[in-house]
Image: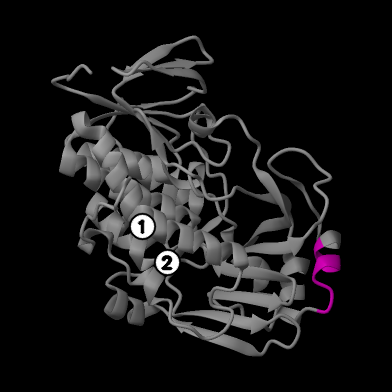
Amino acid sequence: MTTKANPCIAIIGAGLGGAAAATLLQQAGFTVNVYEQTTELSRIGAGIHIGPNVMKIFRQMGIEDRVSLMASHPDYWFSRDGETGEYMARIELGKYALKEYGASYITIHRGDLHALQIDAIAKDTLHFGKRLEALDDSGDEVLLTFTDGTKATADIVIGADGINSKIRDVLLGAEQPTYSGWVAHRALISGEQLSKYKLEFEDCVKWWTEDRHMMVYYTTGKKNEYYYVTGVPHPELDFEGSFVDSSREEMFEAFQGYHPTVQALIESTETVTKWPLKNRNPLPLWSRGRLVLLGDACHPMKPHMAQGAGMAIEDAAMLTRCLQATGINEYKTAFELYEDNRKERATRVQTVSNNNTFLKTQEDPSWVYGYDLYQQELKMGNRS
């Protein structure tokens, strides 16, 4: 193995997890290049929850205050019966989260958050239009080949390239993710559109019935944008692509009998899309050779805990800690340390999220929100 004086890290994918890894590793003094397949950023996506467990990582990255200023800060997560409106859970957030968990709980537009994260990455180290075609781990370095004909080398490669990860395919063989039998409808509604209703539109509420739900929250501090995302059974995947257009008619049918507030939301919807929810089983390994995975490339999950991005960002922070502890030249030890300190938590969140039970009734979420990654002692598991 060749030891280099200035080793380089390549990150494949500049989503929320990949962007966090880039900033944290660069802050730690590592040389990092990020390769993103899209050609430019836009305010795509929709809403996202960021818990105190992740805001503490944003504090380390230096973006916590800017994120906080843009976001909505709900005082509660409410769970309500979809038909009767009865409250099934009132989970304190707001000032309680600051006091008990050490940081805010926020909801924000994913595109706005992503833009802040991208801005934190060192200039000229983020490369757009770089779709990975092939890679070759020779043992001494990794050769990356992109579809535009360009090549690059790196000492280690981090696969932050999502559920359809090319890096995962190299590690474990090509395999399509499985369809879960559920779809998610997504829509943004203007606050002005809702003002005509004499109804209470709460800052953060999940409407439930036995086999479906609708999660609703504001995506800006100005409360001028209200977002919903659903989970609805859809046994056969009868459409192609990452999403297709849906309609108010389809929404009314899916949520027939739901509370008047939900009916008002659907009535106010101008554009709604439908996304298949896909999944993978827990992976038998997170790394091999000079390649390592994080986020959805490693442990994708249904979005029902609002922690998928959170787990990717936690992965990024833990991987950075492990590489700091060992140095890149001891990357194998770093990767083992990373998996040993992440797998149990990520698998637990993946399982609970896929089961769609989190906060349906009154419970203590401190195991999620109170977690401080920087206070965790690094532990190496027993390996045969």
Q: Residue placed at 52% from the left, 59% from the top?
A: 350
Corner quadrant of residue 232: bottom right
Contact, mark 2 vs mark 1 (Cβ under 8 Å): yes
Question: Which quadrant: the N terminus?
Answer: top left
Q: Which residues are magenta?
A: 251-257
Q: Which residue is mark 2?
A: 106
Of mark 2 and mark 1, the one earlier in the sequence is 1
Q: Percent from the top left, x then y, of residue 279?
A: 62, 49
- Tell which of 87 and 300 is nearer to you: 300
Question: Which quadrant: the C terminus?
Answer: top left
Q: Percent from the top left, x then y, of residue 143?
A: 39, 15
Corner quadrant of residue 123: top left
Three-letter amino acid code at the position of disc 1: Val
Q: Is residue 255 magenta?
A: yes
Crowd around label 2: few <14 · some 14–19 · many ≥20 (10 Å): many
- Does residue 307 sit above or below 129 in this rendering? below
Three-letter amino acid code at the position of disc 2: Ile
- Tell which of 214 and 41 is nearer to you: 214
Q: Secondary structure at mark 1?
A: helix
Corner quadrant of residue 235: bottom right
Q: Which residue is mark 1?
A: 67
